[in-house]
Image (cartoon, rainbow, N blue to C red):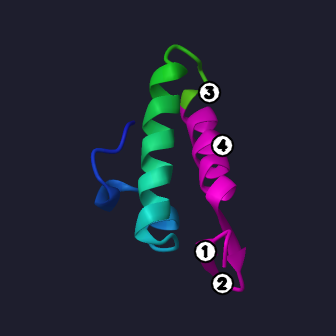
């Protein structure tokens, strides 16, 4: 299901990503979810694409997600 706002993201995303990364995840997830309509693995594909979008701009440093330029 698409996420209307960052507070509706799953705790595994909401509680670990900084706000900007949550924005990226939500936008990518919602777009991918729409693009894969009718696919039986729609939600799985949307999650993979959303995480890839976050990892394009952020990386994990210890237990925190930080922008790649840090």
The answer, for residue 11, to whether it is visible in the render is yes
Q: Give the quadrant of residue 10.
A: bottom left
24 or 39, which lies in front? Answer: 24
Residues tagged 2 and 4 counted as in contact (Cβ below 8 A): no
- Residue identifier under label 1: 65
Q: Position of residue 65 (x, y in %)?
A: 61, 74
Mark seen at residue 48 = 4
- Residue identifier under label 3: 41
Element assignment for label 3: loop
- Residue identifier under label 2: 63
Q: CA distance from mark 1 to mark 4?
A: 17 Å
The answer to which of marks 2 and 4 sits earlier in the sequence is: 4
Q: CA distance from mark 1 to mark 3?
A: 27 Å
Range shown magenta: 43-70
Q: Position of residue 30 (x, y in %)?
A: 43, 36
Whether residue 64 sits left or right of residue 3 in the image: it is right
The answer to which of marks 2 and 3 sits earlier in the sequence is: 3
């Amino acid at each position: 299901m698409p996420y209307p706002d960052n507070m509706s993201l799953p705790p595994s995303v909401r509680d670990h990503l900084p706000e900007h990364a949550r924005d990226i995840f939500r936008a990518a997830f919602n777009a991918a979810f729409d693009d894969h309509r009718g696919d039986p693995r729609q939600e799985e594909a949307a999650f993979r694409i959303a995480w890839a979008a976050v990892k394009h701009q952020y990386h994990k440093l210890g237990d925190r997600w930080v922008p790649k330029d840090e």
